[in-house]
Each structure stands twice: as C-alpha cells, then as structure tokens.
C-alpha cells in the first residue's frame, strides 16, 4: 500500500521539531524549566497537551496512554513529546554505563529531549541546556540534526499507523473526557514565536 505524502512528511517533522525547540526555549526563559508536553500537528494547527507532574512510573505510563488517545482524538498528522531530562552519553570509547540511572550519573547532562513521530517515522533531538554557575538558564546548546530511527520506551509508538476513523476519534475523545480532559483549539499560531 502506498502512503500519501500527507500521512508522512519528514519536513513536517523538522518543522515540528523546530516548534518544540522554540517552545522549550520560551519555557526555560520564562519559568526556568520545561514541563512535559505533547504537541500534535493537526489540520487545525498545533494542539498542546500538558499533564500535571510526572512524579512516578505510573504517572509516566498514564501520560503515554493519554498521548496515544490525544493523537487519535485530534487526528494528529505528527506528534512531538518535549521533556526535560537527565541524559547519560557514551564516553569517548563508545561505552555507556547502563547500570547507573542518568539522574544519578556523575557525568549526566541536562537536556531537552524532543521525541517525534508520524505514521511512519520516529526521530529524536537532544538539546543541551546551558545554565549559569548559579543554576539559572543561560541558553540552549547546539541541537544538531534530527536522529531518525525506531523509537523505544514508554514514550514511543504514540501515533496510530493509519488515519483514525471518525468512530475511533469519538471514542478517544470520550475516553479523554472521562479522564477530565477536553480537546480545545485556542487558535495557537506557530508563527508567533
């Protein structure tokens, strides 16, 4: 089956990644941190979904499930999850110590992780957060190009593989309403960064 360009557009993911980076920069400048956020690229523009705090694995799992419902409920063409996190990177020889959690590693780096998906592609961008000696936000480092590949973990495979039917959209919206959520487009204009 041949997929249409509308279903999968790598340039759309690039634009969405840039929007997510602009969002992260805005949040860091105004609040000093980036709340975990999902941004859906829809026919009606960008729609944001932000949970309350993700304090434990159960809350993170619940947010991943909400993001899956959100993607269906708003018929997302692409989705990006933006999270501030500690990251451990491989050393010069390429070795990565996976026995130590990134948040506990002495070599950890504070990053904004941008995790993107459309119906076909998955991509990641890690953006270094630069802080002053006193801990305040100083800027974002070089993010480099998007890294395409298979997504792994709880915040992957959030997008449906096919455009959802109207009945699926309505069911996802009802499930979100049962969770106390409602999709509302307030006219966000992505050109107003």
Image: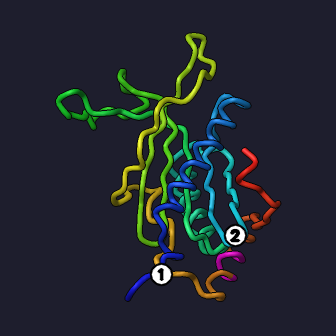
Could you give the CA–CA distance between mark 1 and mark 2, rounded to whole angstroms?
29 Å
Q: Quadrant of residue 182?
A: bottom right
> Residue 161 location in percent, x, y?
46, 77
Residue 161, above or below 54: below
Residue 40, above or below 140: below
Quadrant containing the C terminus is top right
Q: Is residue 173 one of those drawn in magenta?
A: yes
Q: Residues within 10 Å of mark 1 (few under 14, many from 20)?
A: few
The image's colouring method is rainbow
Residue toward you, 56 or 25? 25
Highlighted range, magenta: 170-174
Residue 80, above or below 184: above
Q: Which SS type dominates the magenta stretch?
A: helix
Report helix, strand or loop for mark 1: loop
Total numbered labels: 2
Going by the picture, which residue comes out furthest to the left? 93
> Residue 40 location in percent, x, y?
62, 62
The residue that mark 1 highlights is 4
Q: Which mark is residue 176?
A: 2
Please give the name of the residue rendered at 32% of the width and 33% of the height, measured from the top-left corner: 89
- Which badge, 1 or 2, is on the more N-terminal residue? 1
- 169 to the left or right of 5: right
Residue 69, above or below 26: below
Please give the name of the residue rendered at 62% of the width and 64% of the height, measured from the top-left corner: 41
Q: Quadrant of residue 33?
A: top right
Q: Quadrant of residue 181?
A: bottom right
> Residue 148 location in percent, x, y?
36, 56
Q: Is residue 160 one of those drawn in magenta?
A: no
Q: Residues within 10 Å of mark 2 (few under 14, many from 20)?
A: some
Q: Which mark is residue 80?
A: none
Q: Nearer the viewer, mark 1 or mark 2?
A: 1
Report helix, strand or loop for mark 2: helix
């Amino acid at each position: 089956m041949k997929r249409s360009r509308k279903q999968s557009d790598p340039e759309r993911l690039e634009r969405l990644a840039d929007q997510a980076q602009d969002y992260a920069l805005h949040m860091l400048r105004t609040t000093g941190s980036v709340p975990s956020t999902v941004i859906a690229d829809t026919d009606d523009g960008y729609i944001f979904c932000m949970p309350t705090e993700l304090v434990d694995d159960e809350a993170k799992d619940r947010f991943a499930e909400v993001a899956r419902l959100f993607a269906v409920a708003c018929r997302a063409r692409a989705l990006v999850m933006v999270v501030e996190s500690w990251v451990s990177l491989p050393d010069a020889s390429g070795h990565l110590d996976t026995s130590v959690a990134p948040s506990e590693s002495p070599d950890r780096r504070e990053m904004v992780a941008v995790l993107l998906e459309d119906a076909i592609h998955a991509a990641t961008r890690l953006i270094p957060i630069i802080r002053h000696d006193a801990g305040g936000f100083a800027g974002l480092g070089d993010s480099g190009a998007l890294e395409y590949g298979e997504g792994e973990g709880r915040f992957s495979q959030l997008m449906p593989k096919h455009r959802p039917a109207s009945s699926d959209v309505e069911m996802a919206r009802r499930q979100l309403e049962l969770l106390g959520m409602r999709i509302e487009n307030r006219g966000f204009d992505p050109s107003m960064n």
